[in-house]
Image: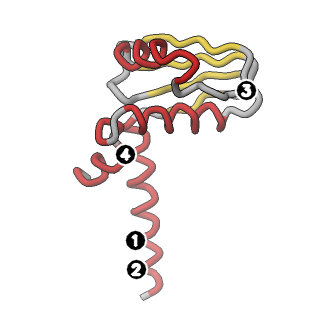
Amino acid sequence: MFAGRRVVSPGVAGGVALTGLIRSAVARLGESRKIQLRLHPSDAASVEAAGDGGPLAGVAIARVEIRPDPTLSPGDCIVDGEQGTVDGRVATRLEEVRRILTRALAEEEGAR
């Protein structure tokens, strides 16, 4: 699972991975007029400092509230909107990778 952590950990690619995660999470919420973006405090500060050129550049939404959340690890992100919540924590992404690999291995074993 160490290799999986390296694949999904935003620390590997720095802010680029977090930017992609934020954009993907916001897109999954659809047409929300208000979004609350919960990030580790250091990530929240970076996103706020980036301003209009940061991860939220070009995102068509009315209002984004960036909220530092000390319960999250660096690289984690939870996005709340009118349509629901997108959990972008590293642990959640690792679990998804594990589920996909387990299913693929089971299908492969069944085909033999």
Residue at the image position 58 percent from the left and 25 percent from the top: 56
CA distance for labels 4 and 2: 26 Å
Residue position marked by numbered label 1 in the rendering: 105
Q: Residues within 10 Å of mark 1 (few under 14, many from 20)?
A: few
Would you say the residues marked 2 and 1 are in contact, meaning their CB atoms lie under 8 Å apart?
Answer: yes
- Per the image, label 2 sits on a secondary structure element best described as helix
Choose mark 4 or mark 1, whichever is in front: 4
Q: Earlier in the sequence, mark 4 or mark 1?
A: 4
User: Viewed as shown, does residue 45 lie left or right of 26?
Assistant: left
Residue drawn at x 70%, y 16% is: 34
Q: Quadrant of residue 104?
A: bottom left
* In the image, farthest residue toward the bottom: 112
Q: Position of residue 111 (x, y in %)?
A: 47, 85
Residue at the spot of label 4: 8
Instruction: Say whether disc 4 or disc 2 marks the residue closer to the N-terminus.
Output: 4
Relative placement, left or right, of 63 versus 93 is right
Q: In this rendering, would 50 be left or right of 98?
A: right
Instruction: Looking at the picture, tell me which residue is in the foreground, 51 or 104.
Output: 51
Report the Cα–Cα distance between label 4 and label 3. Answer: 26 Å
Q: Specify the label residue 109 is tagged with.
A: 2
Nearer the camera: disc 4 or disc 2: 4
Disc 2 residue type?
A: Glu
Mark 4 secondary-structure assignment: helix
- Badge 2 local density, few (<14 within 10 Å), some, or many (20+)? few
Q: Amino acid at mark 1?
A: Leu
